[in-house]
Amino acid sequence: MAIETINPYTNKSVKKFDELSDAALENKIAQAEKAFGTWKTTPVKSRAELLHKVAALMLKKKEQLAGLITLEMGKLIAQSVGEIELSASIFEYYAKNAEKFLADKPLEVEEGSAFIRYSPIGIVLGVEPWNYPFYQIARIAAPNIAAGNVIVIKHASSVPQCAQAIQELFDEAGATAGIYTNLFISSKKVAGLAADTRIKGLSLTGSEEAGASLAEASGKNLKKSVLELGGSDPFIVLEDADLEKAVAMAVEGRMGNMGQACTAAKRIIVVEEIADTFLEKFKQQITGLKVGDPADKTTQVGPLSSEGAAQHLDEQVQKSIKEGATLVMGGKRIDREGAFYEPSILTDLKPGMTAYHEELFGPVASFYRVKNEEEAIKLANDSPFGLGGAVFSKNIDRAKKIADQIDTGMVYINEPTTSQPDLPFGGTKRSGYGRELSGLGIEEFVNKKLIRVSGK
């Protein structure tokens, strides 16, 4: 696979990078192992200082870095700036809270004393996607570097300039070589790294197929892994919801990042007594959005990440229509240069249809009418995925009870699934396992060592 920037706005190649040779890759891993030998005993305060510097540099260079995101995967520039700001906040969060999270945890015992000590384990390999090229890295790098681990990253081959820029941020912040390492390698090299005894943990954000492959490799080598995979998040709107707010949040939740988010509001589920009104308002809000250059701040509809992504989405939509789904609006490529696809709505979806079961990674909303909350819950859970979800109701107790019955790792009430440093992020079922962010995120790749002092 080529490691190459292809601007999805023009579908033209911008820059290519050479893959690391086997010898160069070996040198990178050896360097990381050497760095861990020192970093694991470095005081948490000193580790935190590095994270503070990385965060500060991110904010200082946010316009430049955001421009790379927009260039390489087509994100609207305002959203790219927002991603850089969120990423910086994650580094800041762990810089400020690492000491608290890693403090010894006393245990209540009948005699003597005991406590849990959190110790780093070594090199952690991250395999990361293109849709949030800085944020995804922050989620794994910040907590693990704070914990005393070192990180090696195989980033998506379509965002090499973002990958290089992150490496340069750590270098400029004064990180010892090996604490954070970008690897320009193909996916074929991941299995070999998983088998390398110097690699102690593996984390992947990506497709089910990629997740299954990494889980197999990590299991075969008896190594801990964390997976954040696909999603088909339900967005439930009850009859007592604030309708205007729910519609606005549905547009934001489905169309943000051009729908290319695992936690996008992919399945909009509305009780029948307000369904027609909701659908009409939703349709009005996504009709006539300005299509154009994602680097232009006035653009509202940019390209998908690649020509391949746009083609695949169109195939899913056309197949669903042939299977009996109703196209409310959109449903085709935009007739212009670039990887563009129309904001679209499908309804009358039934089990067996492509759009009912598969994740639609783009600006296509699946709309469902249900009789009541019981049907909404049943439909929400009728999915192989279990990442996030949302419930809209003015009755918070009612919404909490529904949230409790939804089989996902996260449920948000009266807002779409989002992300912030102090909230755990992760799913269940085929959406993966493990958690990132919050205090839980720093505990995934540490040895929770019991130390016991005898009372006899």
Image: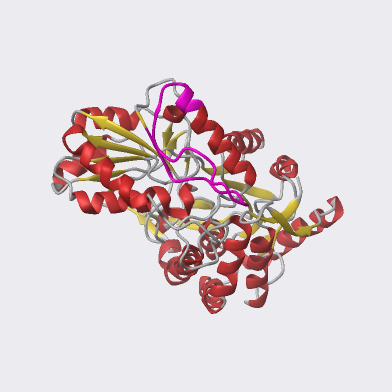
Q: Viewer-proximal residue, 335 or 171?
A: 335
How was the colour assigned to the protein in this rendering?
secondary structure
Q: Is residue 174 above or below residue 456?
A: below
Q: Residue at x 52, y 32 (%)?
A: 316
Secondary structure mostly taken by the magenta-highlighted segment of the chain:
loop
Q: Is residue 231 above or below residue 446?
A: above
Q: Viewer-proximal residue, 114 or 428?
A: 428
Left or right: 381, with 98 as reference point: left
* Coordinates of residue 104 in the picture (x, y in percent): 42, 61
Left or right: 163, with 390 as reference point: right
Question: Is residue 424 within the magenta segment?
Answer: no
* Coordinates of residue 246 in the picture (x, y in percent): 25, 49
* Coordinates of residue 78 in the picture (x, y in percent): 47, 66
Q: Is residue 111 visible?
A: no
* Coordinates of residue 152 in the picture (x, y in percent): 67, 56
- Splitting the image into 4 quarters, where does residue 245 fall? bottom left
Q: Residue at x 54, y 73 (%)?
A: 62
Question: Is residue 325 within the magenta segment?
Answer: yes
Q: Quadrant of the N terminus?
A: top right
Q: Viewer-proximal residue, 373 or 456?
A: 373
Q: Viewer-proximal residue, 311 or 231?
A: 311
Q: Is residue 48 visible?
A: yes
Q: How many marks?
A: 0
Q: Residue at x 62, y 77 (%)?
A: 173
Task: Tell me the magenta residue range.
Answer: 319-346
